[in-house]
Amino acid sequence: MRIDRVLAGVLAAMLPCLSPAQQDTQKEIERYRQMLAEGNPADLWEARGEELWKTRRGPKNASLEQCDLGLGAGVVKGAYAHLPRYFSDTDRVQDVESRLVTCMVSLQGFAPEDAMKNPFSSPDRQSVMEALVSYIAAESKGMKLDAPVRHPKEIEAFRIGEQLFYRRAGPYDFACVSCHGENGRRIRLQELPKLADPKDAQKIFTTWPAYRVSQGTVRTMQHRLYDCYWQMRHPQMDYISEASIALMVYMAKYANGGIVNAPALKR
Amino acid sequence: MKTILSLLAAGVVVGCITPLSDSESRQRAERVFRETFTHGNRQMAARVERQDEVQALCSLYRNEPPKEIAARIEQSQLATLRYPASGRLMGDWRRGEKIAQDGYGLRFTDPDTKRLNGGNCYNCHQIAPREISFGTIGPSLVRFGRLRGEGEPVQKYVYGKIYNAEAFAACSNMPRFGHNGVLTEEQITHLVALLLDPDSPVNK
């Protein structure tokens, strides 16, 4: 199973450089169909996430069950549909991952650097974050996304995110808008959402985290942004950086009103 | 008690913050951007933090610069064009096709070896019709040479467009492959051949 996944990842990673790419694309599509028929593997991440949520861990030997994700301590149901948001105890706008780090530090006693270790899994190393986010997102499935952009810090994050969205830099002169500024465009065969268009944003923002067939794991929105900046020939984006959260608030404003359908299944 | 205090504090904050002006939010975004890449390659970070004039203006105008700014950009970028000393602009279309397919280079995971960067052309353009995995951010280039000819003026245009697209269309999405050092002069001549050579699959 693992070798199979690694192979699928390698194949997908090579996809853009192969010619003709048709055969590999076809293989990928067949894998998709198979996965769809079998259900979303993210179910396993959700189950592991729920267990992690309830397990006593860390120096304080505590679970995350008293973590406040925005709707009060311990409320998971619906919380993801209202993230990112401003939290008064940290005086910051936080996404689900940044908030989980806060809870791992305050409730479980982890050092921040330990809480932020391995946020993205690799074939030989599972990620606590990917599982927890899968569980939390699934608890908002079917609910309307309503990430608040009302508090001054939320509005500020939106404005910063908007500036960053258009900021061109690096050897390719790329900004987010280079790929996400128009409807109906593609990179190779991958369709691209226009992120300032509610119709596209509602469909896309609400489907992260997602099980990525090409990577054999669930990836979160933090990873999606990190991956975008990688493609944009920018350096490695810091995990839960202020910029990453500002960009999420920017996207969420257009995505609000969409229905949370995560974890989804993607290429 | 703590909660009440923080609620009060939030209230005070709400009361006295006015919405950011454009220039204020730009300044804050710049500060935030500079705090974003602290764990990676410092040289790469320095390169994205420092925008050149084209990047800064196109960011400011969100890729829709007013006429006079667009003219200024195109003029300054025209001045950057450098053609091969040999005068030969048409290379080998077969090598051009490989470069057009290749997405290697300049990502933080790409090892700093002698391997040349790819052009990523198919990511955004349809080029040779047999390749069905092509992007649509840029226009289709199928039959480019057949439609435009293959003489020296067209060769110069194509070479220049790949070298620095901003010289022809201010705030174009297309990277400045020559000017920014992504592709070598020789690589660009191979791409010119891919588009213009009558034997290239593009023109079949």
Image (spheres, helix red, strand yellow):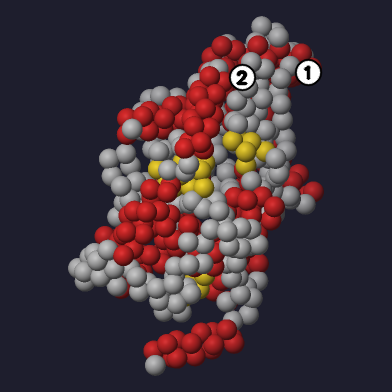
Label annotation for residue B148: 1
Q: Position of residue A14 (x, y in %)?
A: 45, 27
Q: Position of residue A207 (x, y in %)?
A: 55, 51
The chain containing the residue under callout 2 comes to B
Residue visible at 40% across and 73% down in the picture: A74
Label annotation for residue B64: none
Residue visible at 49% across and 32% down in the picture: A34
Camera-side residue: A244 or B69? Answer: A244
For the N terminus of chain A, the quadrant is top left
Quadrant hosting residue A129: bottom left
**Residue, disc 2:** B131
> Mark 1 belongs to which amino acid?
Arg
Residues at marks 2 and 1, CA–CA distance in whole angstroms? 21 Å
Q: Residues within 10 Å of mark 1 (few under 14, many from 20)?
A: few
Residue visible at 55% across and 39% down in the picture: A172
Residue B29 in view: no
The chain containing the residue under callout 1 comes to B
Q: Residues within 10 Å of mark 2 (few under 14, many from 20)?
A: some
Q: Residue furthest top?
A: B199
Q: Point out the frontmost of discs 2 and 1.
A: 2
Nearer the N terminus, badge 2 or badge 1?
Answer: 2
Residue B161 in view: yes
Q: Position of residue A144 (x, y in %)?
A: 61, 63
Q: Is residue A34 left or right of residue A175?
A: left
Residue visible at 37% across and 72% down in the picture: A67
Camera-side residue: A129 or B6? Answer: A129
Quadrant hosting residue B113: top left
